[in-house]
Amino acid sequence: MPVVFSAHGVPKVVPATAEDRGLDYFDATCPLVSKVHRQAERLVEKGIHILFIGHQGHPEVIGTFGQVPPGAMTLIESVEDAEEIDPADADNLAFLTQTTLSVDDTAEIVSVLERRFPSIKTPRSEDICYATSNRQAAVKSIASSCDAMLVIGAPNSSNSVRLVEVAERQGISAKLIQNADEIDFAWLEGVAALGITAGASAPEALVRQVVDRLSEHFEVTEREVETTRETMQFKLPRELQAA
């Protein structure tokens, strides 16, 4: 049975270990994450120290740090970290980011880094996943017309948790649920306009199940708000195509 590596990416040692053990594997790393991996490798090859904006312990952070030698990157989790970091060579820095961060939080951290280290090198393009940033923008767009918001996604999904935070910053109550069974109808008491969004990897079927369950308890009128149309497509991993 083949091993599948997560879309979050894995450290280089993982596929190497799989090969040593004679295991077949599919590398399902998201191309946007792979792009960050390649940027990290190129910067380190040039002797540049990387300040990596992300969350300690997140699989994507572990995977990205595992692309370069120990000590080549420093994790920045907050504005406070950005203010306090004291690099050995302040003129030889670059920053990269986890792809599933809050756009607003990341902008604040980047602003601090660019103020403190004017020569810091920036990514050639936005590292935050387009699906993540699009969903955050959509939440901001509909929040003013909602009394509350349900976010469909896993509690260990960074981009889903960020959607809850974005909604709350817009001044409305928000709750993360994994599926229709987790709907708290007592929490919905008094809510006339409910916003529903989902994490980047939540299947449409889960969204429909939530709407259907709500329809069993309320008279539901749906209104879909489109803030942007996503047309990007990625090819299957070569190994999976071959299989």
Image (cartoon, grey):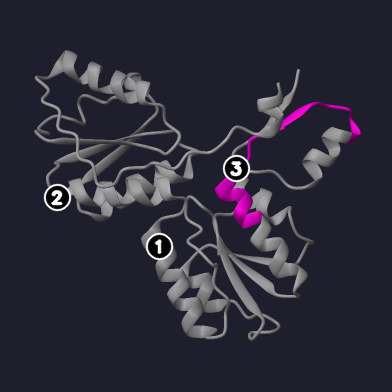
Which residue was labeled with disc 1? Answer: 105
Where disc 3 sits, the SS reads loop
Q: Amino acid at mark 1?
A: Asp
Label 1: how many Cα within 10 Å (few below 14, some 14–19, many 20+): some
Q: Residue at x 41, y 33 (%)?
A: 153
Which numbered disc covers residue 144? 2
Q: Over which residues does the magenta segment extend?
A: 20-37
Sequence-first tag of 2 and 1: 1
Between disc 1 and disc 3, the foreground one is 3
Q: Distance from label 2 to label 3 (Cα)?
A: 32 Å
Is residue 77 rendered magenta in the image?
Answer: no
Q: Amino acid at mark 2?
A: Ser
Q: Quadrant of residue 216?
A: top left
Which numbered disc covers residue 8? 3
Q: Amino acid at mark 3?
A: His
From where the camera sits, is residue 57 visible? no
> Quick check: 231 left or right of 16?
left
Q: Residue at x 38, y 52 (%)?
A: 133
Between disc 2 and disc 3, the foreground one is 3
Name the residue at the top extreme. Answer: 216
Where disc 2 sits, the SS reads loop
Q: Distance from label 2 to label 1 (Cα)?
A: 20 Å
